[in-house]
Image (cartoon, coloured by chain):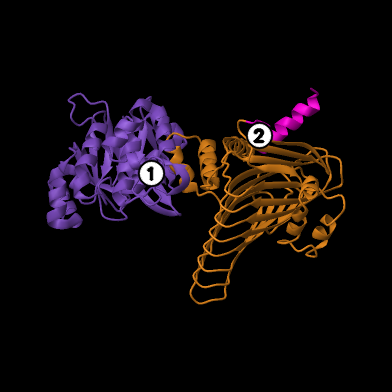
Chain colours: A purple, B orange
């Protein structure tokens, strides 16, 4: 579904991603690990087309279309959707108005209230986007928007950070639904960034990938990789990865 | 009906004038110096020309030049003339009318339109006014409007003024408001269309436990200069002032002023100016002033000017909006001041103005 070929990306003139290659098939979910500053968010932002992330080499192919030069809203129409780590606060722009736009993409207008209820965001509908929202509320608002967009390819930038224990199950279940993790025959695919890996207790993934210094450094079973990182840190995990390859 | 008449009606509707007894409790229309329509649809409220009011009540004279100094400048002196006209709107004691009174000042043929308005909300009354000021597209001239607002004990007055001029009109309103004990005065000002120059600095005198809210939404287009401020004297304990402005420059120059003077202890004031520049050659100057004359009071201000954040545009595009839709949503959100009692017609007018601006971006 998504093919990334030799992708290099700069932010503020600094090269963050270096020749990244990745191939994700229909039905697959990737868990993306890596230390701070390794380029995880950069990769996701480059896929969705954030103009602050400049593609200086390589291509992004989605559903057999080269989307490297497409504006963000066109990529969204093709079926890519993303939840952001720290989305902006926009005064006067109400959550409900944005939700209506999201729902229009998928024809899910009827589901706005039901899904808002499910993610405990009913009370926030008429408030300005993210103004005065808690960390967990911001994340739930992001997931809610994506549930209404119902994209084929889902990008999740740390959906579990700042979410308290009480709500992580709700968020996890919503993400599982987005990625059709409970189905045997899945149409959806996606990439999920997780720092602590908590979300993996609720959402299964097919592969784990480590991004290190802007390069794909390791690919394997997500739970194994997470255990290695927890035990030996990123350096140790990479060393082991290298050894296994030989 | 002539085409000219329809054109005028459309123009008036833009600034909130409906001529509809179901939507308005009274109506007043002044063309140049002559009053052409006066009606009250509701028993309690009095609406008439200031000339008629002076004939009817000899005490009206006592309200003249009480809150605005007639010697203040060349414009006040000019308005202190024999041929001055204007409106007199009064809610008698204990009369509460939610449906607004509409008043319109229309500049057509004269070089100088001189207006003196007296607005009185007597004790325990409630009065809502929508006033629109506009001009014929071909008019060239100067509008001087003196307005004196008297909000008596426990009364509440909401005054929404919409300006829709043309680029050959110079506008010099001079306004003062006295808010007596426990009174509330809410003043909303909206300017969306081109104008040569608007310059004003309405001043409120706020007494014990009384409150004033000034809220301004100003769009300055190419060639327009808008110098607009609001001032509040907090004179007695418990007085509260809130001054909010949202200004957008699309090529025009805006000077947005605000001044809160704390003259007594136990008063509270807050000033908020936010500006958005949508054009390379626009200019916004924010001048907030706080003057404290006693130790135990609370005055604060915040001012911020910028352009639309690319991050916000990108975010909304990631939710399926086009770039234009995203910019429009952000600008509309920026102008969304929680103004109580904003009529539906006005919301439509604001939306339309933004839509036009978006197309020009």
- Determine if residue A219 is in view: no
Residue at image position (17%, 40%) is A202
Report the magenta residues as a range: B1-21
x and y, in percent, of residue B270 in the image: 52, 62
Chain letter belonging to callout 1:
A
Say which element carries label 1.
Answer: helix
Q: Is residue B173 magenta?
A: no
Indicate whether B63 appears above or below B86. below
Which mark identifies residue B4? none
Residue where numbered disc 1 is placed: A45
Q: Position of residue B140 (x, y in %)?
A: 84, 44
Left or right: where B171 falls relative to A186: right
Residue A63 location, quadrant:
top left
Q: Is residue A51 left or right of residue B232?
A: left
Task: Judge whether A199 appears above or below B58 on screen.
Answer: above
- Judged left or right of residue B295, residue B24 is right
Image coords of residue B247 (percent x, y) = 61, 52
Mark 1 vs mark 2: tell me if same chain: no
Count of numbered badges drawn on the protein: 2
| Tag 2 residue | B41
Q: Is residue B20 magenta-colored?
A: yes
Disc 2 secondary structure class = loop
Q: Chain of mark 2?
A: B
Cα distance between the residues tagged 1 and 2: 60 Å
Between A41 and B15, which is closer to the camera in this rendering? B15
Of the two numbered discs 1 and 2 in the rendering, the one whose residue sits closer to the viewer: 2
């Amino acid at each position: 579904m998504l093919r990334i070929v030799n992708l290099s990306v700069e932010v503020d003139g600094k090269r963050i991603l270096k020749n990244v290659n990745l191939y994700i098939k229909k039905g697959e979910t990737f868990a993306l690990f890596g230390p701070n500053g390794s380029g995880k968010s950069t990769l996701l932002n480059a896929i969705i087309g954030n103009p602050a992330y400049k593609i200086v080499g390589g291509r992004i192919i989605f559903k057999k279309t080269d989307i490297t030069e497409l504006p963000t809203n066109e990529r969204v129409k093709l079926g890519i959707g993303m939840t952001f780590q720290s989305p902006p606060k926009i005064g006067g722009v109400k959550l409900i108005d944005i939700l209506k736009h999201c729902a229009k993409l998928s024809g899910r207008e009827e589901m706005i209230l039901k899904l808002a209820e499910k993610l405990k965001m009913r009370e926030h509908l008429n408030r300005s986007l993210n103004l005065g929202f808690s960390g967990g509320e911001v994340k739930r608002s992001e997931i809610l928007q994506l549930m209404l967009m119902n994209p084929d390819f889902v990008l999740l930038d740390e959906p579990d950070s700042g979410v308290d224990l009480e709500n992580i199950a709700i968020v996890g279940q919503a993400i599982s639904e987005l990625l059709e993790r409970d189905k045997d025959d899945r149409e959806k695919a996606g990439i999920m960034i997780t720092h602590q890996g908590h979300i993996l207790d609720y959402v299964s993934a097919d592969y784990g990938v480590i991004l290190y210094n802007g390069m794909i450094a390791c690919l394997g079973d997500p739970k194994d990789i997470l255990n290695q990182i927890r035990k030996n840190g990123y350096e140790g995990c990479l060393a082991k990865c290298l050894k296994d390859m030989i | 009906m002539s085409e000219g008449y329809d054109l005028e009606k459309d123009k008036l509707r833009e600034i909130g004038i409906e001529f509809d007894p179901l939507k308005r409790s009274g109506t007043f229309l002044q063309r140049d110096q002559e009053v052409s329509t006066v009606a009250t649809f509701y028993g309690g409220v009095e609406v008439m020309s200031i000339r008629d009011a002076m004939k009817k009540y000899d005490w009206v004279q006592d309200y003249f030049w009480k809150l605005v100094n007639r010697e203040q400048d060349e414009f006040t002196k000019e308005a202190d003339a024999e041929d001055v006209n204007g409106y007199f709107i009064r809610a008698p004691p204990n009369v509460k009318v939610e449906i607004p009174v509409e008043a319109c000042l229309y500049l057509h043929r004269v070089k100088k339109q001189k207006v003196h308005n007296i607005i009185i909300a007597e004790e325990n009354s409630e009065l809502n006014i929508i006033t629109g000021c506009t001009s014929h597209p071909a008019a060239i001239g100067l509008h001087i409007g003196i307005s004196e607002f008297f909000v008596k004990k426990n009364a509440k007055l909401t005054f929404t003024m919409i300006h829709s001029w043309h680029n050959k009109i110079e506008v010099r309103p001079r306004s003062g408001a006295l808010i007596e004990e426990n009174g509330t005065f809410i003043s909303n000002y909206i300017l969306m269309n081109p104008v040569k120059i608007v310059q004003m600095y309405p001043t409120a005198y706020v007494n014990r436990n009384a409150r004033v809210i000034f809220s301004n939404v100003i769009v300055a287009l190419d060639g327009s200069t808008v110098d607009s401020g609001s001032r509040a004297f907090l004179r007695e304990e418990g007085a509260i002032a809130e001054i909010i402005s949202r200004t957008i420059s699309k090529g025009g120059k805006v000077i947005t002023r605000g001044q809160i003077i704390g003259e007594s202890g136990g008063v509270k004031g807050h000033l908020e100016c936010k500006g958005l520049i949508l054009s390379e050659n626009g200019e916004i100057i924010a001048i907030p002033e706080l003057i404290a004359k006693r130790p135990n009071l609370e005055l604060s201000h915040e001012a911020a000017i910028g352009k639309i954040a690319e991050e916000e545009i990108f975010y909304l595009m990631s939710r399926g909006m086009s770039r234009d839709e995203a910019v429009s949503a952000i600008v509309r959100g920026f102008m969304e001041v929680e103004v109580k009692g904003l009529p539906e017609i006005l919301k439509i007018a604001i939306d339309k103005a933004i839509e036009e601006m978006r197309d020009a971006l």
